[in-house]
Image (cartoon, grey):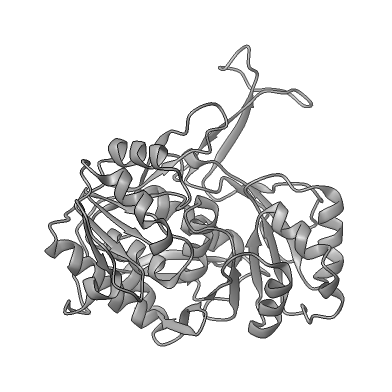
Amino acid sequence: MAVWAPSLAAMYGDRAAVVDGDRVLSYRELDEKSAQFAGALSAAGVAEHDVVLMHLGNCAEFHIAYYGALRVGAAVTLVNPLQPEPGLRRQIEETGAVAAVSQPQQLPTLLGAAAGTTIRLVAVVSDEPVETGAVEAVRFDELLAGHATEFAPAQVGGDDVAHIAYTGGTTGISKGVRVLHRNVVGNVTQMCGWRAGYQTVVKDGLVSLEKIDGLDIAGVVPGEGSTIVVSPLFHAHALINTSFLLACGLTQVLAGRFDPARMLELIEIHRAGYITGSPAMWHALATHPDVATRDLSTVRVVSSGAAPIDHVTLEALAVAFPNATVAEGYGLTEGTCVVTAMPLARGLRYRIGSVGLPVFDTEIEIRPQGDMTATAGPNERGELWVRGPQVT
């Protein structure tokens, strides 16, 4: 993942990568700014295998910081910026994060949590001066200023840590999961194949896409179209989907705080073709009165994840987005993100409510709870066991 930003720039150049309000960041600019952030981290003493805390909502700087941190060889740990101070401090202490990227509204909480920890630098996405305390805080733009727009990616390996991701805590306290570079690259590659029909290849030290022979996918066309991003990038579902769609050259339009009317408007304005989100978002969109008056004909893929979606909403989505395939998927933090998804092969019949098939190179078994060495038969319940390159 350290070479991801320069690879994207080589493939898509001046094409728009991120639209954040009135700001447009091209793939080339994303590469250059991530190089500046990597240079700033390096100058501050952040090195390979250190950890950078991403304490941000959705914004262009999230992408810059994410790819910049990976570029310098650091791992990133993602956190909800609304996380209360005790939980935030626990994550800082467990990960040993040495730097953080934050925003003004939540900065006091972060500075309080970081006091006396390993955090020594906080970059703040703000147009206004920021107050500093026991931990040095500096404006994000000021941190980047003066650093070169080129930075040689760190020589990290597949077994180096890319993310320290935290589980949802459904079985108790949230736990940190070490997600390796090969896990992230594997999962992004799987999605490129499953939803676009392309595989990632490495040439001259950079990643590029190559069409998979014999696979006819009616989903993403690399280098074309856009997507509207409303799911939080600090969640694996949004982050991996964004990485996959950036790998395919789609423009990421950041919608900000979710508002169904505004979301439908953005879909129409930007003629979005691929939208991913949670069941709650899809229910709000499918039942909104503006569905009847907005031109949603460009949407080809409606992708839902992070939780099960009910049949009523699925049927409503088929009406609201008449030209789209409604596709679900399933994943878990320990699987980087996605382990099953609906392939978008032309002519494939879809069963409403299915979370699809195991993605490329993934094996799934259902084993009875009483005997973990056996495989469950038809109509038997059990535990889901997964093996694949994305499994941590």
Foreground pick, 280 / 242: 280
Foreground pick, 217 / 356: 356
Residue 243 in sight from this viewpoint: yes
User: The C terminus lies in which quarter of the figure?
Assistant: top left
Q: Residue at x 73, y 66 (%)?
A: 346
In the image, is 118 to the left or to the right of 309?
Answer: left
x then y, percent, for residue 229:
57, 67
Foreground pick, 83 / 170: 83
x then y, percent, for residue 259:
68, 67
Q: Residue at x 81, y 51 (%)?
A: 352
In the image, is 185 to the left or to the right of 320?
Answer: left
x then y, percent, for residue 41:
19, 62
In the image, is 275 to the left or to the right of 92?
Answer: right
Q: Residue at x 38, y 74 (%)?
A: 8
Above or below 321: residue 11: below
Q: Residue at x 68, y 77 (%)?
A: 267
x then y, percent, for residue 74:
25, 53
Above or below 376: residue 78: below
Residue 181 in sight from this viewpoint: no
